[in-house]
Every structure is written in structure tokens, then in C-alpha cells.
Amino acid sequence: MKKFVLLAGLVAVLCCITLMADAQCAMCGTTVNTSAGEGGKSTAGLNTAILYMLAIPYLAFMGIGILWYKKYRRKQIVMQMEENKISLN
């Protein structure tokens, strides 16, 4: 329990810290800056590509979770069988 509280506190602190990130490659940054200044449509394409790249890992994990749930869920089946001997003669 102590480890869980410590881990939860660490995650909460890390979620509250925000840092400015400039995580764009040089070529993409140049393309966006020049295209936005000229009124081009390549920025919409880059935004769509970013959305696809963000969505695919979530969809993959969701698919794995659904398969895991379906495979390992317990089925509540009650079987009541009579223990009478059956004579086939």
C-alpha cells in the first residue's frame, strides 16, 4: 500500500509539471512555417498525419485489451448433473 501511494504521488507530480517542448524536426518546422505564411494546405496534411500517429497506439492497446478481456473473463456457468446411472440394455 505504501508503494502504491508513493507511485500515485509521483505520477500526480509528474502530471502537474508542464514543460515547453519543441519536438518537431527541422524539415517539418520549415515546411509548416513557409506553408502557413503562403496560405498552403500542407499544414492540414501534417495535422492529419499527427492525429493518425496519435490514434494508432491507442487503438492497438484497446484491441489488445478487448482480446485479453474476452479470453480471460470467467464465465458463471452452473452445471447441475444428476448422478443416476444410465442403463443402456
Image (cartoon, rainbow, N blue to C red):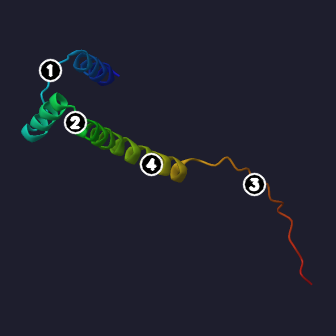
Q: Residue type at mark 1? A: Met
Residue 2 numbered tag:
none
Disc 4 residue crowd, few under 14, some 14–19, many 20+, Cα 10 Å: few
Q: Residues within 10 Å of mark 3 (few under 14, many from 20)?
A: few
Percent across and percent down for residue 43 are: 23, 36
Q: Name the disc covering residue 63, or none.
A: 4
Q: What element carries label 1?
A: loop
Q: In the shown orientation, is residue 39 left or right of residue 55?
A: left
Q: Tag 1 or tag 4, which sits nearer the N-term?
A: 1
The earlier-in-sequence mark between 1 and 2 is: 1
The N terminus sits in image quarter: top left
Residue drawn at 19 percent across, 30 percent down: 36
Distance CA(mark 1)–CA(mark 3) = 60 Å
Residue shown at 9% from the left, 35% from the top: 30
Q: Nearer the viewer, residue 84 or 22?
A: 22
- For the residue pair 51 and 3, the one nearer the viewer reads as 51
Residue receiving disc 1: 20
Outermost residue on the left side: it is 26
Relative side of 35 to 56, left or right: left
Q: Distance between the residues labelled 1 and 2?
A: 27 Å
Is the residue marked by circle 2 packed among few (<14), some (14-19), or many (20+) residues within 10 Å?
few
- Residue 40 numbered mark, or none: 2
